[in-house]
Image (cartoon, rainbow, N blue to C red):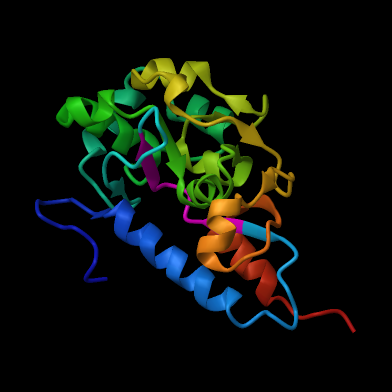
C-alpha cells in the first residue's frame, strides 16, 4: 500500500486523520444509497494490532503503528527475559512477537516520549470508528487480544503483562463483549454522513469476521 509510511527501516505506519477521512467517505457513500432501506444499526471490525492515539480531548495525536512494523522487536526479547513464553501464552493465548501492540507501544514510549505522554488512550481502529461516530469508548475481546496485554482467562487487562512490558493499563480502553449496544450515532455525525441516529455495536477482529460472513448460508 502506497499510503503506508516507511521512512525508516522496519517502520509501517498510517496517518490516522487520512484513514478516518476515508472511512467517513465510505460510510457516507453507502448511506447515500439506503433511502429506500434505511440503516438500522452499525457494527465495526478492524485489524487488531494497530492502535489510534487520542489525547484527553479525544483528538488524534499521532500516527497508527501497524502490526507489520518491526521496530519493537527488541522489546519482545526484553519481555521474554521477564516472563516466560509459556506464561505469556497462558495469559494471552498468543506466542509473543513484534507484530503485537505491546511491542509498538513500548517502542513509542521509548523513542517518541513526547507523543506517548500526550496520548490519553490508544484505541483499536474499529473502536476508534465507534468512538468518532458516537462518542462512546469501548473495545472488545477479539481486538484487545491482539495487544498481548489482555488476560483471556480473567477477561480483563493483564496487570502482569503490563508490568513486564513497563506499560500503564490506563492508556488502554475499557472492554465490552462483542455485540454490546454502545449507544447511538451522534446527531452531528448522523447529519454529516447522512445516517440515522442508529445503534452501534463493536464486533471483533477483521479476519475471523470476514471468514464468518463468507461461509455458505444454510439451506
Q: Which residue is at the front of the view, 31 or 107?
A: 31
Q: Which residue is at the front of the view, 16 or 218?
A: 16
Query: In the image, residue 74 lies at what x, y percent?
Result: 22, 33
Q: Does residue 190 lie above or below 58 as drawn?
A: below
In this image, 97 relative to 126: left or right? Answer: left
Question: Quick check: is 45 in the magenta stretch?
Answer: yes
Residue 95 appears in the figure:
no
Query: In the image, residue 216 lies at what x, y percent?
Result: 76, 80
Query: In the image, residue 176 lies at what x, y percent?
Result: 67, 36
Residue drawn at (68%, 56%) of the image: 197
Question: Quick check: is 16 in the magenta stretch?
Answer: no
Residue numbers of the magenta segment: 44-54
Query: In the image, residue 173 lies at what x, y percent?
Result: 52, 31
Query: Which residue lies most toward the left here?
Result: 8
Q: Does residue 173 lie above or below 50 as drawn?
A: above
Q: Does residue 5 lie above or below 26 as drawn?
A: above
For the N terminus, the quadrant is bottom left
**Number of disc labels:** 0
Residue drawn at (69%, 80%) of the image: 35
For the C terminus, the quadrant is bottom right
Residue drawn at (51%, 77%) of the image: 29
Amino acid at each position: 500500500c502506497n499510503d503506508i509510511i516507511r521512512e525508516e527501516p522496519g517502520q509501517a505506519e498510517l496517518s490516522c486523520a487520512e484513514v478516518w477521512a476515508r472511512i467517513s467517505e465510505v460510510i457516507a457513500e453507502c448511506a447515500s444509497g439506503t433511502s429506500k432501506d434505511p440503516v438500522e444499526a452499525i457494527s465495526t471490525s478492524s485489524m487488531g494490532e494497530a492502535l489510534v492515539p487520542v489525547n484527553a480531548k479525544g483528538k488524534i495525536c499521532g500516527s497508527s503503528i501497524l502490526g507489520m512494523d518491526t521496530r519493537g522487536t527488541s522489546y519482545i526479547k526484553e519481555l521474554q527475559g521477564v516472563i516466560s513464553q509459556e506464561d505469556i501464552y497462558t495469559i494471552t493465548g498468543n506466542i509473543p512477537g513484534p507484530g503485537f501492540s505491546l511491542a509498538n507501544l513500548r517502542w513509542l514510549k521509548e523513542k517518541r516520549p513526547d507523543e506517548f505522554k500526550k496520548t490519553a488512550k490508544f484505541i483499536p481502529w474499529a473502536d476508534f470508528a465507534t468512538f468518532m461516530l458516537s462518542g462512546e469508548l469501548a473495545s472488545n475481546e477479539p481486538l484487545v487480544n491482539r495487544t498481548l496485554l489482555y488476560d483471556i482467562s480473567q477477561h480483563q487487562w493483564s496487570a502482569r503483562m503490563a508490568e513486564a512490558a513497563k506499560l500503564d493499563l490506563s492508556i488502554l480502553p475499557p472492554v465490552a463483549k462483542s455485540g454490546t449496544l454502545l449507544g447511538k450515532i451522534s446527531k452531528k455525525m448522523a447529519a454529516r454522513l447522512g445516517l440515522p441516529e442508529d445503534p452501534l455495536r463493536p464486533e471483533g477482529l477483521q479476519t475471523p469476521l470476514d471468514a464468518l460472513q463468507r461461509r455458505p448460508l444454510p439451506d
